[in-house]
Amino acid sequence: MLNFRLQVFKSVAKNLNFNKASSELLVTLPTVTNHISDLERLFNLRLFERFENQLSLTRPGKVLLNYTEKYFSLLRGDIVPPSLLPRSKSQSKSYLHHLVCSSCGKVHPIKKINQTCLSCNKPLITEYSIQHFDKYGLFLRPSTMWRYREMLPVMEDENIVSLGEGMTPLLQVDNLAQTLGLDKLLIKDESLNPTGSFKARGLSAAVSKAKELGITKCAIPTAGNAGGALSAYCAKAKIEAHVFMPRDTPEVFKQECLYHGAKLTLVEGNINHCGKLVEEKLTEEGWFNMSTLKEPYRIEGKKTMGYEIAEQLDWVLPDVLIYPTGGGTGLIGIWKAFEEMENLGWIGAKRPRMIAVQAQGCAPIVNAYQQGLNSSTNIQDPHTIANGLLVPKPLGDFLILDVLQQSNGIAVAVTDQEILSGVKLLASKEGMLVAPEGGALIAGLQKLLSDSAIHPHEKIVLINTGHGHKYLEVMPHSG
Ligand SMILES: Cc1ncc(COP(=O)(O)O)c(C=O)c1O
Ligand SMILES: [Zn+2]
């Protein structure tokens, strides 16, 4: 007899031999299995507590399982019945507590509209007063990044602006792993987010918080994806969006903003020039600046990639995590998530080596890393087809470099040619058509393998940040 508390879909349970009186669920296994995951898949069940070593089902037969009726499982695509998401009107579910300057430590209150530190102008970091929050209860939550509700900065549920972002798949890419001679390679596929990139996460969090704070107009400098995501979330939130984008950004990114009703300004130059224009007009226009790390909460949305990777890997982090780094918000956010999860008691002290991949034509972090510096130098005349990586001097450079150092990580640069080869390799081996930023990951991985900076037996996670469809204009297949 197996002793498990079960989560059971009511509809499925009806078809099974479901004995309410004895609190037991009788399950007949039609096939040979010795894995809990097989059992779960067969019966559309989710086990609430796992004692993997105790389960040994080697032949079909009858298995008796204890169940607790109150635990229901929600899988991706299920409609979340409101009754499963208990809400308290008087008490916010968020553990949000205060903002602290990442450089001088000055504390900023959360009820005000904040941008950067009032003393030193550096990015503000969100801190939470962590209480008990049972990770196994996550099974009850919707399949979006808002399943980590307590560790996100929005106080009231009605302010959450969501298009279903997050809980993207962590795909095991065995064909590619075999080609590269690796044991275990996984890709977190962020291209499946609303607007086709991971930017949806940061902007869902930031626009939700802006709504909560009563902000009605905002502006953003963007390499492309963030502008589209801001436009979409602002449309949903009924907030005015002003997007500043380099003129030579692929057409799709411009059209996307226009469709969502944003006001689009095309700029001669790169994202830094866009940022300057936004700053110049802010006060006069009464805009809130959504520029990453000048706005404190985009990082909070992006950190949920770290939470999901842990949850999807059963709370054991990989050995290596590779991230295409422009402004570095995701890298900093994921690292923050790891620390928060350790404080929540969800994971142990093990951390992956964090690896930043940049484009050779714009590699301020790689340069600083190689010189052992803790801040970067502005890149003159930056260029690459991976426009998300076109950040000549990231505001959070010192934070990125700190993560690389703390995690014993590394920074590596790849050429546009290598990026395109990476996109092709992944598309042809795995059926995934990724953004050039995703191609850069494959190229970076190949480089690090040949330098022996990564070992073939390590468990490696790549974060593919965007969809290839948006970039076909700048990366046509050469035949
Ligand atoms: C597809 C894509 N990947 C990566 C990045 C860089 O992200 P981060 O600012 O978190 O380094 C961007 C930023 O625009 C992007 O659009
Ligand atoms: Zn400060």
Image (cartoon, rainbow, N blue to C red):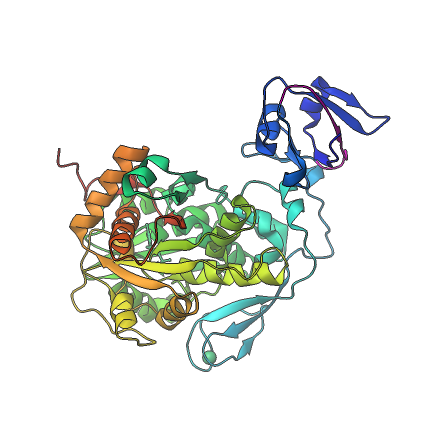
Q: Is residue 299 left or right of residue 367?
A: right
Residue 113 horizontal/vertical position (percent): 52, 68
Residue 153 horizontal/vertical position (percent): 57, 59
Residue under the point 68% across and 19% down: 61
Q: Is residue 273 left or right of residue 293?
A: left
| Magenta span contains residue 125 | no
Residue under the point 76% across and 29% down: 1
Q: Which residue in the rendered view is the most extreme toward the left?
A: 478
Residue under the point 57% across and 62% down: 340
Predominant SS of the magenta segment = loop
Image-quadrant location for residue 94: bottom right
Give, as a single range, the part of the protein colored magenta: 59-71
190 to 57, vertically: above or below: below
Residue 464 horizontal/vertical position (percent): 36, 46
Nearer to the camera, 324 or 208: 324
Asked if residue 239 can be seen in this view, the reply is no
Residue under the point 37% across and 73% down: 398
Image-quadrant location for residue 413: bottom left
Asked if residue 167 can be seen in this view, the reply is yes
Total labels drawn = 0
Nearer to the camera, 119 or 338: 338
